[in-house]
Amino acid sequence: MTEQRKQQIINDLMSIYNAFEPTEDEFVLSMFVLISRYNATGHNVELIGGDWVIENCPEPLKSLPV
Amino acid sequence: MSYSSKRIKRDADQKPIPQYFNPNTDDYEALQGKNGAYNVNVLESALPAGAATDAKLDLILSKLEDVESELTAIKSTNGIKKIEDTVAVQLTGSSLPDTQALPVKQAFNYELETIINAESVPSNQTSFKIITTNGEAELWFLVSIDKQPWRLTAGTPWFTQYSWGPQPFFPVRNNVANTSTVSVPIISLYVPLSPSLSSLGLTAPTTMAEARQFLTPPPKSFGVGVHNGSAETATVTLKVLRVWRS
């Protein structure tokens, strides 16, 4: 994965992070919710998951609850 | 008169005897004794501090009489202690019949571990992991998945690969049509004997209590997997709650 692509993924994830609003089912933004919403965009061609976020993303993404 | 004007007392041989001068009788008197010693009058003023006196003895006797009165008051006529006021009582021991086992408190310890962390699982594929155990009494698996249908599978003591099937769980999670979140996961107990598989010859449990009767220690190592049966990529989190009893 290129640095450019990695940064693009991080930007996408940060957008999800910033847009998150608690719901009755998901009252906190967990790693599961982050990846689930990223998968829903159809952009996750690399099939990244929570472990990739922990290894490659800055705060606050890398410290989301699992 | 004074002692100097009186004659001292003498014995049969006219020798002076042990004597003292008594001013009340104005004469010498022989000293009396008992048990090989003189009779002695002790002046209270000459007593050491704390020595017994008539006054102190009277006080002690008075206290003893008070104690005697109190004991008499709290005893019935046959000497058994009477308890008439409300008394706080703590029972000890057991009221169980001799034939019944004493209840034993069990200490629990547990640990929640994430073994699949928000993995993206393509359509009709399985995310799986190898579980190693360390004396756990129970293993509970918590599934979070955003697509359906799905199934939870695991190995058994005699076939440890995850692909063995969904039967080593209660409830069995096979072709589940519900999704779940990490806040509200779907939970199953790992039952290594897989009693839900009728071909094993066991009676399939219908309640958690029945399922627990089939519980055996888990294998030291076995596979567990979550299969995504949907047409889309699923997000999967799988946690294991390890429970130890002592």
Image (spheres, helix red, strand yellow):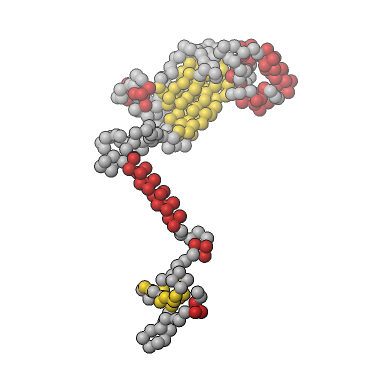
Q: Is residue B21 left or right of residue A44?
A: left
Name the residue at 50% across, 27% down. B240
User: Please, is residue B233 above or below residue B86 in the view?
Assistant: above
The C terminus of chain B: image quadrant:
top left
Quarter of the image holding residue B27? bottom left
The image position of residue B126, as x and y in percent, is 51, 21
Residue B176 lies, in percent from the top left, at 45, 14
Kindly give the residue lying farthest to the bottom in the view shown: B13
Q: How many marks?
A: 0
Q: Nearer the viewer, residue B95 or A16?
A: B95
Task: Note whether residue B48 is visible.
Answer: no
| Residue B150 shown left or right of residue B93 in the figure | right
Of B227 and B137, nearer the camera is B137
The vertical placement of B47 against A34, above or below, is below
Question: From what the image shows, is residue A28 above or below residue B45?
Answer: above
Query: Where residue B66 sits: x, y (%)?
Result: 39, 45
Residue at 41% across, 20% down: B171
Let me know if residue B68 appears in the view: yes
**Which residue is rendered at x = 31% and y = 41% of the image?**
B75
In the rendered image, the vertical position of residue B71 relative to residue B17, given as above or below: above
Q: Which of these two is toward me, B95 or A24?
A: B95
Percent from the top left, x then y, of residue B145? Answer: 53, 17
Q: Residue furthest right?
A: A4
Residue at screen point 52% across, 17% down = B184
